[in-house]
């Protein structure tokens, strides 16, 4: 069975950027819901050294038909030079939630 919903994970530099991105995605119907988490510390290599930065995790719920548009939105609207975008299929869940999400993005 092909997934009807995907979770897209990313991070933003702070809560303000996360909220701005989330609002843009929901208003443009590229996401049915965006959850913004508490700050985390991410360690990653960048420009020849290992960095430790506080970031805000963001989880986006979207449909298969919106993935390509979401990628373009990240390229245009995400403030990072190389934004994280991990797309995970949702293999099961409550039908009313799937229906609600689909209805918003259609």
Image: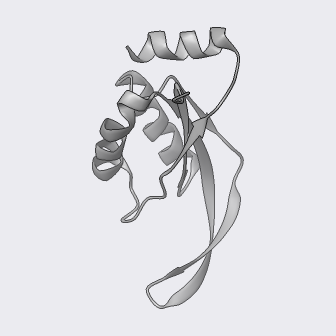
- Who's the residue at 34% across and 25% down the image? 28
* Front residue (pair 10, 53): 10
Quadrant housing the C terminus: top left
Depth check, front residue: 4 or 61: 4
Q: Nearer the viewer, residue 3 or 60?
A: 3
Quadrant occupied by the N terminus = top right
Decide: is 48 above or below 88.
below
Please, is residue 52 above or below residue 65 in the view? below
Image height of 9 relative to 105, above or below: below
Using residue 94 as the reference point, say whether residue 6 is left or right of it.
left
Instruction: Left or right? Give the position of 75 relative to 102.
Output: left
Query: Which residue is depicted at the point 48% across and 35% down?
Result: 22
Please tell me in which quadrant of the rendered image residue 11 appears. bottom right
Residue lying furthest front: 1
Q: Residue 100 versus residue 48: which sits nearer the camera?
A: 100
* Residue positioned 59% across, 40% down in the render: 59
Instruction: Pinpoint residue 90: horizontal percent, then vertical percent.
Output: 62, 33
Q: How is the image coloured?
A: one colour
* Residue 84: % across, % down: 49, 58
Q: Where's residue 63, x and y in %?
A: 46, 27
Query: Disc count in the image?
Result: 0
Q: Residue furthest bottom?
A: 48
Which residue corresponds to the image point at 55% horizontal and 10% vertical from the top-left? 99
């Amino acid at each position: 069975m092909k997934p009807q919903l995907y979770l897209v994970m990313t991070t933003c530099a702070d809560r303000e950027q996360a909220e701005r991105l989330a609002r843009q995605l929901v208003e443009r119907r590229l996401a049915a819901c965006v959850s913004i988490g508490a700050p985390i510390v991410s360690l990653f290599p960048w420009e020849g050294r290992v960095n430790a930065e506080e970031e805000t995790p963001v989880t986006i719920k979207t449909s298969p038909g919106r993935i390509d548009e979401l990628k373009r939105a990240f390229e245009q609207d995400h403030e990072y030079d190389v934004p994280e975008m991990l797309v995970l299929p949702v293999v099961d869940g409550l039908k009313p939630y799937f229906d609600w999400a689909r209805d918003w993005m259609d």
